[in-house]
Amino acid sequence: MNSSELKIKHDPFAALRIKEFIFFLSSRFFLTLAIQMQSVIVGWQIYNYTKDVLALGMIGLAEAIPFIIVSLFAGHVADVFNRKYIIILATSLLIFCTSFLLYFTLDTSTVIQAYGTFPIFIVIAGVGFIRGFVAAASPSFMSQLVPRELYANAATWNSTFWHVASIIGPAIAGFICAVSFSSAYTVDVVLIVISVIFFFFISSKPIPKKEKKESLFESLSVGIKFVFSNQLILGALTLDLFAVLFGGAVSMLPAYADKILHVGSEQLGLLRAAPAFGAVIMALIIAYKPPTKNAGRSLLISVGAFGIATVLFGISTNFYLSLFFLFLTGAFDNVSVVIRHTILQLSTPDEMRGRVSAVNSIFIGSSNEIGSFESGVAARAMGLKPSIVFGGIMTILIVALTAKIAPKLRGLNLKSLH
């Protein structure tokens, strides 16, 4: 290998030199900004109405159930239809959902007073359904925008843009919520519209050809069988699944900000942004020094450290310490995100990316919402602080168990997958 090839291989900005990938990241950035804002707005709104930690958990469950139901079918759709148009249509439908949430704030005298928070939960269920299609099509489409040798680099920047939006979104939402919920939802709608516009600058990509024709049932089962027969993919997904499931402290932040830290919506926005800020810092480090050689060990250590940081957050009663511990959870979590995405991209055949992405989204995407429900139930049963500490301890135990039963994951070297 000559010096010029070596320079290209270690170029931390290689994926960013691809124009269509930049449009993809821009669209994803604004969509993530909107979704993160919406999460804070809905959480603060529901908590203001109910003052109930379980209601916060129910937000996650309302989104997770339709998400899980539709995900496998969405993966099949992403492998047989144009992925660009799937994303544009699904994102456009999010505009209507957010517009309904805006309408509820403008017409509280009839809808909310008559039915309470039930209409909000109905819209959140619709968001979960739509997110199932976006989660299946988006990673599959991204893999068609960059060459195989840049998958790890693209995953790093994809994660970076997502987390930058996750920093800005909650912070903006917290401050605008202090003005009014209507203003916050209005900004949210505008951001989703911008996200859709960026996708029109990306050309359509051909659907990868399948080796054989399959029935719908066969198509759906292939993705599941592929994931469960691959120890690396299954181990990485399972590890993240339980870490997110038990480490869902973020979903309880409205109650934590109110009852433990005694702060308002502005500080809540900063707390929600802290994990994403940590993730961005870690992503920049990973861009220059990717965790390839000892990826399995790095994955296990980072998820274990995530659990420890969660425990420390659960113990803290100081706002600034809580910010710092949440920052650490995001930093450590991002290591596992980049490694998991790289494993998926390198191990999955092109014609199966939609279905495997769907299985991944069930493991990871829905576990965020189900984790929110678990956190709400645990907080109701144990109390707010003990439930968060319990979640962190369970995450650490899951890491120890995974390290023991998945030796291939423990010894993973990402260079061997290229």
Image (cartoon, rainbow, N blue to C red):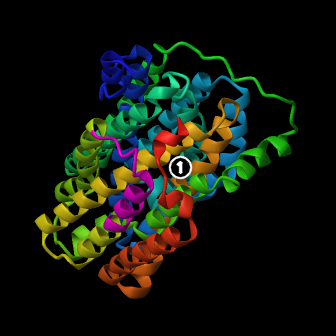
Q: Is residue 278 above or below residue 263?
A: above
Q: Position of residue 237 (x, y in %)?
A: 54, 56
Residue plotted at (36% across, 74% down): 392
Q: Is residue 161 magenta?
A: no
Residue 93 visible to the viewer: no
Residue for badge 1: 123
Q: Amino acid at mark 1?
A: Val
- Name the side, left or right, on which 391 lies relative to 96: left
Q: Quadrant of residue 390?
A: bottom left
Position of the N terminus by quadrant: top left
Q: Position of residue 119 (x, y in %)?
A: 52, 55
How far across and how far down the image is residue 263, in percent?
A: 16, 66
Q: Nearer the viewer, residue 156 or 215?
A: 156
Q: Nearer the viewer, residue 168 or 242?
A: 242
Range covered by the magenta-colored residues: 289-305
Depicted 106 relative to depicted 63: above or below: above
Left/right of residue 24 with respect to residue 271 in the rendered view: right
At x 40%, y 59%, the residue is 297
**Which residue is at 58% across, 23% downward?**
84
Q: Against 242, is 180 above or below? A: above
The part of the image, by quadrant, that contains residue 318 is: bottom left
The image shows residue 323 at horizontal and vertical percentages of 18, 61
Comparing 134 with 395, the one in front is: 395
Label 1 crowd (10 A; few <14 / some 14-19 / many >=20): many
Q: Secondary structure at mark 1?
A: helix
State yes or no: residue 295 in magenta: yes
296 on left or right of 63 = left
